[in-house]
Image: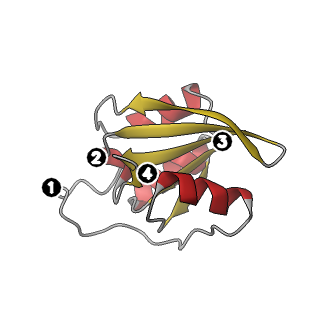
Amino acid sequence: MKIAIATDGDKVSGHFGHCEGFTMYEISQGKVLGHEFEPNPGHRPGFLPVFLKEKGADVIISGGMGATAQQLFTDNGIQVIVGASGNCSDIIEDYIKGNLESTGAVCEEHAHEGHCED
């Protein structure tokens, strides 16, 4: 299983579309096998769900995400977890332990130039 976390530095990004990149964790039998950083190739409507699907993501974790993006991830077979915050290594451990749940929040207003949709 591959889990993508929208990342700024070593923290979960508040908005996936404007993050520095995605920390991609490979998980098997409840253990992290490794991780790598994929730089954000740029925010374009509808692009990032397909990009992450091509990178093998099964799950996307982010602080915030618009409704359209959440639907596009779902359409691409990628589970969406929003409302996460903190250090990526702590978040991935919470996910593995089953302690990370999506808040289901839809990002509508924030400080990212009004680009909440995807």
Q: Amino acid at mark 1?
A: Glu
Question: Which is closer to the viewer, label 2 or label 4?
Answer: 2
Question: Which is closer to the viewer, label 1 or label 2?
Answer: 2
Tag 2–tag 4 contact (CB < 8 Å): no
Residue 3: give x, y in percent of width and height. Answer: 61, 43
Residue 64: give x, y in percent of width and height. Answer: 39, 62
Q: Which residue does the numbered mark 1 point to in the structure image?
A: 113
Mark identifier at residue 69: 4
Residue 46 visible (yes or no): no
The numbered mark, 2 or 4, whose residue comes first in the sequence reads 2
Quarter of the rendering occupied by the N terminus: top right
Between the C-alphas of marks 4 and 3, the distance is: 15 Å
Q: Amino acid at mark 3?
A: Asp
Q: Quadrant of residue 96?
A: bottom right
Q: Which residue does the numbered mark 3 point to in the structure image?
A: 58
The numbered mark, 1 or 2, whose residue comes first in the sequence reads 2
Q: Which residue does the numbered mark 2 point to in the structure image?
A: 18
The numbered mark, 4 or 3, whose residue comes first in the sequence reads 3
Element under disc 3 = loop
Q: Nearer the viewer, residue 42 or 4?
A: 4
**Residue positioned 62% across, 69% down in the render:** 101
Q: In this image, 94 relative to 88: left or right?
A: right
The numbered mark, 3 or 1, whose residue comes first in the sequence reads 3
Tag 4–tag 3 contact (CB < 8 Å): no
Q: Quadrant of residue 91?
A: bottom right
